[in-house]
Image (cartoon, helix red, strand yellow):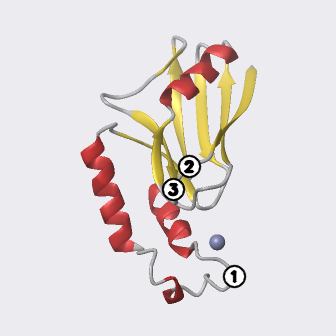
Amino acid sequence: MKSFRQELWFETAGRRDFINITSEVEQCLQKSGIKEGLCLVNAMHITASVFINDDESGLHHDFEVWLEKLAPHAPTSQYRHNGYEDNADGHLKRQIMGREVVVAITDGKLDFGPWEQIFYGEFDGKRKKRVLVKIIGE
Ligand code: ZN
């Protein structure tokens, strides 16, 4: 069995952002040389997510509004976590959007359903953070 590991690094200009990382993951898969197997992609930080959905700006706006309704950033004093930090909402938003995705690899390609794309979800940005890509198979 072959195994491949790579970290992808991101630093968003704002506190929150969604970044399509599908092409970066596809590059990892090409480098791995693996044709049949599984590809795990996970955020390595507890205020960031990796998720699969549509690359459609209206939907991304809807996610942002929905998450902000569920866990508003302000007032930061509403959260017990915010003693030394101001990112309690980021932890909650990450929990909803998920830590990782697993995509099947078939015939050397990510075996997606219609319109599926992989996104990095940042909820406490403006600093360097990373995503792990781990691919196993033959
Ligand atoms: Zn925190």
> Farthest residue in the front direction?
13
**Residue 85 drawn above or below residue 43:** below
Among the 4 quarters of the image, the one containing residue 85? bottom right
Residue on which disc 2 sits: 12
Q: Position of residue 19 (x, y in %)?
A: 47, 41
Q: Residues under labels 2 and 3: Cα distance? A: 5 Å
- Circle 2 residues within 10 Å: few <14, some 14–19, many ≥20: some
- Circle 1 residues within 10 Å: few <14, some 14–19, many ≥20: few
- Circle 3 residues within 10 Å: few <14, some 14–19, many ≥20: few
Q: Amino acid at mark 2?
A: Thr
Q: Amino acid at mark 1?
A: Tyr
**Residue 78 drawn above or below residue 124:** below
**Between 46 and 19, the one nearer to me in the picture:** 19
- Does the beta carbon of the residue at mark 3 sit less than 8 Å from ligand 1? no
Q: Does residue 26 appear in this view? A: yes
**Between 89 and 136, the one nearer to me in the picture:** 89
Pick whichever of labels 2 and 1 is earlier in the sequence: 2
Residue on which disc 3 sits: 14
Q: Is residue 113 left or right of residue 27?
A: left
Q: Residues under labels 3 and 1: Cα distance? A: 20 Å
Residue at left offset 60%, top offset 36%: 40
Q: Does residue 34 appear in this view? A: no
Q: Are marks 2 and 3 in contact (CB under 8 Å)?
A: yes
Q: Residues under labels 2 and 1: Cα distance? A: 22 Å
Residue on which disc 1 sits: 84
